[in-house]
Image (tube, rainbow, N blue to C red):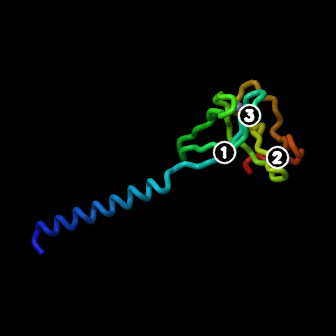
């Protein structure tokens, strides 16, 4: 094998490895879909919000009312209703600082633990 053939083989190998690497990155595009809910007064939108991993993304734009008021939702273990936890609302809104940390599901009244 002469020198040029070896160089050609190395170049081809690098191209193949690079292609596999690019393909894997594309296949596992770094995004995640989270349960979320709109915090606008009078808007009851809940659903999945797709976020870039590590890039934040909240508050996200609400597909129903159009405001950038979608926050991460907490799903009730009892009935599955998605709602925004008071702790998150307090962190987001100056005028909601008086909300209690403990809250119950607005639908089935079961305790809604933070961080679940
Ligand atoms: Zn909304
Ligand atoms: Zn519930």
Confirm or reject: label 1 Cβ below 8 Å from ligand 1: no
Q: Which secondary structure lies at badge 3?
A: helix
Of tags 1 and 3, the one toward the viewer is 1
- Kindly report the distance in space between the C-alpha atoms of the residues bearing marks 2 and 1: 19 Å
Q: Quadrant of the image for the N terminus?
A: bottom left
Going by the image, does 103 lie left or right of 71? right
Q: Looking at the image, is mark 1 or mark 3 earlier in the sequence?
A: 1
Front residue of 11 and 88: 11
Going by the image, does 89 lie left or right of 112? left
Front residue of 73 and 26: 26
Query: What is the crowding at mark 2: few (fewer than 14 residues within 10 Å), some, or many (at least 20)?
Result: many
Residue furthest to the right: 109
Q: Position of residue 57 (x, y in %)?
A: 58, 38
According to the picture, the residue beneath numbered tag 1 turns out to be 48
Q: Position of residue 81 (x, y in %)?
A: 80, 46
Front residue of 98 and 116: 116
């Amino acid at each position: 094998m002469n020198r040029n053939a070896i160089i050609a083989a190395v170049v081809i190998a690098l191209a193949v490895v690079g292609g596999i690497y690019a393909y894997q990155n594309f296949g596992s595009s770094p995004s995640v879909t989270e349960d979320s809910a709109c915090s606008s007064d009078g808007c009851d939108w809940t659903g999945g919000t797709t976020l870039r991993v590590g890039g934040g993304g909240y508050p996200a734009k609400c597909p129903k009312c159009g405001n950038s008021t979608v926050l991460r939702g907490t799903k009730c273990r009892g009935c599955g209703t998605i709602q925004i936890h008071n702790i998150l609302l307090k962190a987001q809104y100056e005028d909601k600082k008086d909300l209690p940390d403990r809250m119950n599901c607005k639908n089935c009244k079961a305790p809604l633990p933070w961080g679940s």
